[in-house]
Each structure stands twice: as C-alpha cells, then as structure tokens.
Image (cartoon, rainbow, N blue to C red):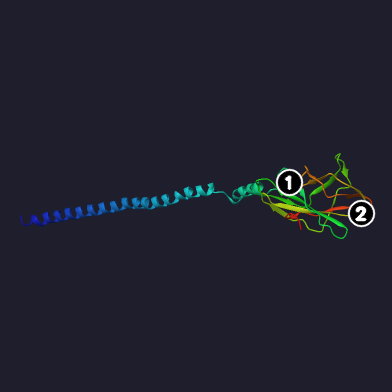
Amino acid sequence: MVHGRPGRLLVGALAVLGLVGGCAGGQGSGASSASPAGRTASAAPRTSASTPGPSASAPARGTPTAATATAPGRGASTAAGGRCHTSELRASVGRNDPGAGQENFPVVLTNTSPRTCTVYGHPGAAFLDASGRQLGADPERSSATPPVRITLAPGRSAWAGLSFSNPEVSGARAATPVTLLVTPPDEHDPLRVRWTGGPVPVSGNASAVRLTALAAGTGP
C-alpha cells in the first residue's frame, strides 16, 4: 500500500498538469480568436470614416463651380446693364448755347424703361423737311470728347453736342428742318424730335454739322 501511493500521486500530478495545459491551450485559442475581432473592430472605424467621404463630396458637386456661379452674374448684367434700345429711350433737344458764330444744341437721350441700361459712343442724326426728305449730309462725328460707357438708371439721361456754324455768318446754303432724327448708338431705329432750332447749313462752305460722343447728363 505504501509503495502504491507514490504511483497514485504521480498519476494525479500528471492529471493536474494535463488540466493546466488544457487551460493554457484554451487561453491561446481565445487570444487567437480575439485577434481577428480586434482587426475587424479596427477596420470598422476605417470603413465608417471613409463612408462620409463620398457623402461629404456630394454637396460639393452640387455647389456651383466658378463658371456656374458667374452665369447668374452675366444674366443680371444683361438684364440690368445691357445696351439701351431705341424703344427704351426718349430723345429731346435742349436749349441752344451759341458762341462765336457757332450754334450748339444738346441732343438728349433719356432712359424711359424700368431697367438700368448703357449707352456708348456717338448717336446718329439727320435733319428732315416737312415731306420727310433729308436736308444736308449726316452730321460728322466729333472727336472733341472721347467715348465712354454711360450707365443710365431709369429716368437718367446722356447728351451729345450738335454743333454747326450759323449760316448767316458762314454764308452756307441753309434750310429749316421740321424734324431731327436721332438714332441711339448701335441701334437701327431712330427717334423723332420736333426741330425748333431754326435754319441749319445744308450745303456750301462751312456746312458741316458735328456731333460729339455721349456724356452723362442733359448738357454742359
């Protein structure tokens, strides 16, 4: 009996070592299975972090680009700052400001439309008699004032100087017009104004009529 106990103790010790080894193997297996879970957990944040990327860039695609953003500006410019058309203007002739044998009349264009528009350069002009026939040549463009672009808000005006030598002084052949046709710059349709400025030179020496570029206001 005494000799059998060491054998039983040895068997028990071996059994205990087997249990310890089994537990150690379970822990290793658990660590191994935890490792993929850890990788999955760390991958999940990376996936969710990249998900907002396309979502965040989607509004950027919807936001107007520089070219798109300027399109409304161009449209607004066309609506509010484009060229004044004949139908949007009224023509008139101001008071004569004579000097040194020269007759000087301001030809005025007024914006009668509800929008702001622009005029630039020289208007056209022609004198007509009672039958509608043109008297004399078209006025020459004067370079006395350089052309500038003028913005006309509703009700605002621009003027051009119409000048010629007094026929009684120059000796030019004269006629008295009934109508002055005024054509706004870059337009084809004229405006009709009743002429009350008296005789104008139509032929002969010193018969030239000159017209300056438009300037802001109604006259000097």
Q: Which mark is residue 90?
A: 1
User: What number of labels is visible?
Assistant: 2
Quadrant position of residue 187: top right
Q: Which mark is residue 37?
A: none
Q: Of 117 and 88, which appears nearest the observer?
A: 88
Label 2: which residue?
A: 168
x then y, percent, for residue 51: 44, 48
Mark-to-mark CA distance, 1 and 2: 31 Å
- Residue neighbourhood size for the residue with mark 1, other residues' Cα within 10 Å, grouped as few (<14), some (14–19), many (≥20): some
Residue at the left extreme, as displayed: 1
x then y, percent, for residue 89: 72, 46
Judge from the rendering whether residue 111 lies leftward or rightward of residue 123; answer left or right.
left
x then y, percent, for residue 141: 83, 53
Residue 10, placed above or below residue 186: below
Judge from the rendering whether residue 136 lies leftward or rightward of residue 181; answer left or right.
right
Secondary structure at numbered mark 1? strand
Q: Of 58 and 182, which appears nearest the observer?
A: 182
Q: Amino acid at mark 2?
A: Glu
Q: For marks 1 and 2, give the one nearer the viewer.
A: 2
Quadrant showing the N terminus: bottom left
Residue at 76% in and 51% down: 108
Residue at the bottom extreme, as displayed: 100
Secondary structure at numbered mark 2? helix
Q: Of 75 and 194, which appears nearest the observer?
A: 194
Residue at 47% in and 48% down: 55
Q: Earlier in the sequence, mark 1 or mark 2?
A: 1
Residue at 31% in and 52% down: 34
Q: Amino acid at mark 1?
A: Arg
Judge from the rendering whether residue 190 lies leftward or rightward of residue 3; answer left or right.
right
x then y, percent, for residue 193: 79, 45
